Amino acid sequence: MIALVEACPNDGRINPCSQCSARRLSVCGVLADEGLQRLSAISENDTFDAGEILVREGDPATNLFNITAGAVRVYKLLPDGRRQIVGFLFAGDFLGLATGDRYAFSAEALSAGAACRFHKKAYRKLLATLPDLETALLDRASHELQAAHNQMLLLGRKTAVERLASFLMDLSDRDRRAGGAGRIIQLPMTRAEIADYLGLTTETVSRVTSRLKVRGVIRLLTLHSLSIEKPAELAALAGLDAGDFPA
Amino acid sequence: MIALVEACPNDGRINPCSQCSARRLSVCGVLADEGLQRLSAISENDTFDAGEILVREGDPATNLFNITAGAVRVYKLLPDGRRQIVGFLFAGDFLGLATGDRYAFSAEALSAGAACRFHKKAYRKLLATLPDLETALLDRASHELQAAHNQMLLLGRKTAVERLASFLMDLSDRDRRAGGAGRIIQLPMTRAEIADYLGLTTETVSRVTSRLKVRGVIRLLTLHSLSIEKPAELAALAGLDAGDFPA
DNA sequence: CAGGATCGTTGATCTGCGTCAAGCCTTTGA
DNA sequence: TCAAAGGCTTGACGCAGATCAACGATCCTG
């Protein structure tokens, strides 16, 4: 049951960006009418289905994307198939910052969704005349880098429980930033994807989830949504202190 | 035996930046005379000794740095003391990109060195009038982000041998980019620091180093410098395929 | 140049998480 | 509506790397 989404939700007239629901979450949110007009002139509105590949590691990096709906996983592979997911992207996120001549990662749709696609060259050219946009991108990149550092701490030094708790806290924060209460968490990804994001296996993700459930810290609503029952305890498990979670 | 270094190596006249040896490695390398002049007007030239703290996690993020000499470790801590080093910085590297209102990391000198220090506000203001510098910073941030993704792959999915081999390859690449042959590697950090960078323990770093030594892949010159004897083999161990290294 | 401190190496043992295996649940498509 | 396939959970067991321990090497400092 794939819910088809309009390419960039808008009223279809004049400037497709001006009514875009993802705008306030995106870098383009800093642009006024004129800049927005020029940006939209070089953008292509794409929709994608679950499983669709947006970017393949090693391919020439010709496109940049602004996700406007749905969810995307960004990952790197080792030759023997081991996978590390370096990020999940949602509406408002920018894809293609960390790029040289070739993509250093693959990106695949987790669910149906939509994105604005830009030719890298045209985008860079436009960027030179829209300093606000460049500043916004730099801010975004700085923020991403900070998130990446947090993920390094997680992958290098946290235990399995701390990793999952941190992940749930991140999703909760994201929900809160998007206007939600941060109590109900949607998990549009599989356990295998969570595992590849947290540097664990599906089995460990499953076991740790069970433990959190039994402890009453979280409650599963469905397989792909849960409610945080004890936010303080979850926060504590996320890295404020270790050893608070007996086997 | 701390070798004192001039703050920003130059001839001491007119524009301190114009003769700076780190300039070609830094973001400021894109600036012509006029821009360089204005940048140098808001910069403070600092020297630091080994062990000196440049930035403390949680402090208000008032300064940005451009390292011009020496080496710096950037790290994050968990409350119980576990440490993750998120990067080593050398001459030409920029410190402070991944910053909000407060530093999300600490930075400490590994060796004596020097840095240009900027007030963040003044820097941002100047940035608005030097688009080339902003573009250079964005490029730098993108590159950092890509490196961060590689590190996530390393921390999340690579074995101990693969991690150390990748680390040595990185240092070799860096040496080559700085004009060296990439065969002789300097290790200005302790084993504990390597461990905290690679998500391992000192013991494991030591053991794996020994194995590489016995195998003839590397040769220790001193405790803190080594030569890569079999670059191809090291590259293979770094992640091209696993299981090529019997215990 | 002597002595203490720190850093590094190596060995023995332990353990958290991975691996292997089996069965259950959910989804989907005919 | 049902069956097949993929996703999820749980259990038993194994192992890579952590921990604990001891000792050797190196480096500061007086």
Image (cartoon, coloured by chain):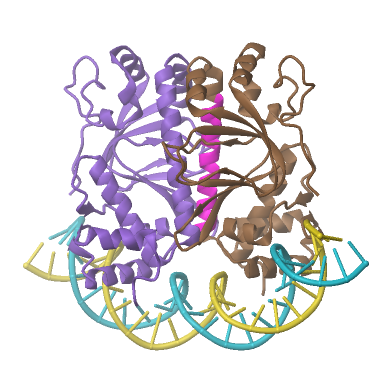
Chain colours: A purple, B brown, C cyan, D yellow
Front in this rendered view, residue B87 or B110: B110
Q: Residue at x 44, y 23 (%)?
A: A134
Magenta residue check for B195: no
* A220 to the left or right of B222: left
Q: Position of residue A119 (x, y in %)?
A: 43, 25
For the C terminus of chain B, the quadrant is bottom right
Q: Residue at x 34, y 76 (%)?
A: A246
Instruction: Please say if B139 is above or below B192.
Output: above
Q: Position of residue A235 (x, y in %)?
A: 31, 58
Q: In the rendered image, is residue B69 in sight? A: no
Q: Position of residue A223 (x, y in %)?
A: 21, 62
* A142 to the left or right of B116: left
Q: Which residues are magenta?
A: B136-156
Front in this rendered view, residue A142 or B242: A142
Q: Residue at x 35, y 37 (%)?
A: A93
Q: Position of residue C19 (x, y in %)?
A: 47, 74
Q: Quadrant of residue A127?
A: top left
Instruction: Please say if C21 is above or below B104.
Output: below
Q: Main secondary structure of the magenta part?
A: helix
